[in-house]
Image (cartoon, helix red, strand yellow):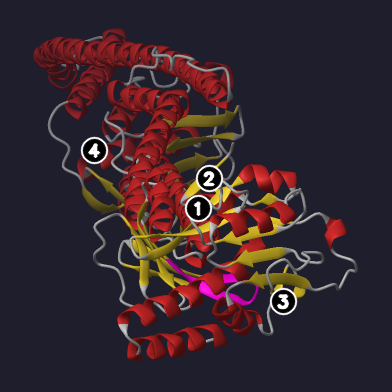
Amino acid sequence: MDALTRRILFLALVALSLPALAQDRAAEVQIKAAFLYKFGEFVQWPPATFARADAPFVIGVMGADDVAAALEQVVAERTVQGRPVVVRRLRRGEALTGLHMLFIGREDSARLAETLAAAKGQPLLTVTESDNAIAHGSVINFVAEDQKVRFDIALPPAERGQLKISSRLLAVARRVISI
Amino acid sequence: MAAPRHSISHKILAVKLATTLVALLLALSAMVAYDLRLYYQNWINDVQTQAELVGQMTAPALSFDDARVAGENLALLRYRPRILAAAVYDARGRLFAAYPQPASGFPKLPEGDGARVEGNELIVFKRIVNDREILGTVYVRAEYSLYDRLLGYLGIAGVVTALGMGIALLFSRWVHRVLVRPVLAISQLAAEVTEKRNFALRAEKLTDDEIGLLAESFNAMLAEIQRATRELEASNRQAAGEVAERRRAEEEVLRLNAELETRVAQRTTELQSANAELEAFCYSVSHDLRAPLRSIDGFSQVLLDDFPKDVSGEAQRYLGRIRSSTQRMGQLIEDLLNLSKVSRGELARRDVDVGEIARQVFSDLQQREPGRKVEVSVWDGMQANADPRLLRAALDNLIGNAWKFSAKAEHARVEVGLLRDGTQASFFVRDNGAGFDMRYANKLFGAFQRLHSANEYQGTGIGLATVQRIVHRHGGRIWADATPGKGAVFFFTLAPGSAPETQASKEVAA
């Protein structure tokens, strides 16, 4: 049993002891952290985005400290595309430079649009968990379905950011938006 | 003739079929074993690869907890009908997705990487690893139709074996037709030739190979035998003809012999009867002649004795002549009667001493003429098997002749002896008297043959004829040797086989 499994088991035990709603949110955070980590495997960034050969893979988390915390645990001692993973917590409006992936916590549409506009055209995989996030230019957006975490993928913003998303990832997406 | 029970063709067929069978079985076994092994390995590789693919395919679904996608991925296995079931377990060992639906009969927990065969099924577990992290495990259950495959192979093997054996059988038939049948044909022909003794049969030359040569040689041999047999038969026929001819000739000879014997017997009988008649006539005539002669002699003597005065001197002289003539005639008749006598009557043969008889003859002669001085020599031990009366008559004549013809010799000498020449014993009577000319030797033994005048020596000329007849009656032979003036020897033999014994000793009589 590896570390992740152990951790997941531990978290599951912790979650069982919490009230139902808190339990749901905790599990959701864990799953989303894990998904974020795994997205890195199915997306190809332009080589220029990495300064050096051993440059780290940087994941920015904005407006979701619980997810950042969970992600930090998940990526510890792990690599994405052979690179060490760095989790950077960002405040709203902070510059997005040096990031490869950006998770934006639940936001209202205006703010979300603002942040996504900043990311637009950059080789940055944007992941959101808000309704209409795709419409605002997010690449991946988490949705809940049948009490499970699923996600939609929009290809045009990815293409604009010169990101190539593996078809295998597309295969497990809830919806893939091409236009 | 039927083919022999363990004929070569059957043996060849058996060997060929056995060889074919063994070769086929070995080849098929090797092929089947190789194929089954290959099948096993390939199928395991195949299924393992399939499991790997399924793993890779379902890795994102596992990562993003999408059992539906995983199920869809697994459902693609319906295009592999030989994969009976498949499942994906998540990292925690829970069943994540399964094919076919509804999921049942799947292991509760996944196992480590591996493949194993359970009955007719191949079970493979394959872990899904991504970046040293185990995402889950794929379980695949595929059909493992080794036995079906084996059965299929056995079917093929059966068909191939049957085909192979069939071909071998056909080949063997061909071999039988090409090789064995010609040999059998020759063999049958040989049996037929032996059975029927028909050397005119010929083997058919069916092939142009060594067997054909055999047939030709066989035919040549048959031709030779036929020729030899024909010659032998001809020779036999000829020999049989010759034998028959010879037998016929022998029969002819026998027949002629028998005829000859019959004729001889007939002639002999005729001759004997003629002889008997002649002798009877002769005897009768001689006997009847004697009476008138006696009258003439008697009355002449009466005239001389009783009437000497009435008969002149001259008449007396004539009467004397009459008497001497009648006496001579009487003697002649006596001799003829003797000759006739020795020819008649049975031979009474017994062992006699020839010397004894000779000595009696000499004694009688000496008494008749006491004045003669003759040196007599009779050998001792001269035995013979003869009729004593006839032998006496013969010796009377021979010794009497010797005595008579040696009368004028200075020292008369008569010898009776025996000469032996092998088994032949010849008696002889030798004198040193007048002898005779050998030119007349062939006339010696005829009746009335005289070599000397009656004036010189008295005699009738019948004596030697009588002797010859006696000797002949004893089955002997008589012959003579002489020199005029020096003497004569008369030899005679008696029946052969009655060889007398002899002891060379001399007895001299005065």
Range covered by the magenta-colored residues:
B128-138
As drawn, the label of residue A88 is 3
- Determine which residue is flagged by label 2: A176
Q: Chain of mark 2?
A: A
Check disc 4 and report its element: helix, strand or loop: helix
- Few, some or many C-alpha atoms within 10 Å of disc 4 (few <14, some 14-19, many ≥20)? many
Q: Main secondary structure of the magenta part?
A: strand
- Determine which residue is flagged by label 4: B390
Q: CA distance from mark 2 to mark 1?
A: 7 Å
| Nearest to viewer (mark 4 / mark 1) | 1
Looking at the picture, which amino acid does disc 4 mark? Answer: Leu
Looking at the picture, which amino acid does disc 3 mark? Answer: Arg
Say whether marks 3 and 4 touch (CB < 8 Å): no
Q: Chain of mark 1?
A: A
Check disc 2 and report its element: helix, strand or loop: strand
Say whether marks 2 and 1 touch (CB < 8 Å): yes
As drawn, the label of residue A173 is 1
**Residue B73 x %, y %:** 44, 52
Q: Is residue A58 left or right of residue B305?
A: right
Q: Is residue B359 left or right of residue B224?
A: left
Check disc 3 and report its element: helix, strand or loop: strand
N-term mark: 3 or 1: 3
Q: CA distance from mark 3 to mark 4?
A: 197 Å
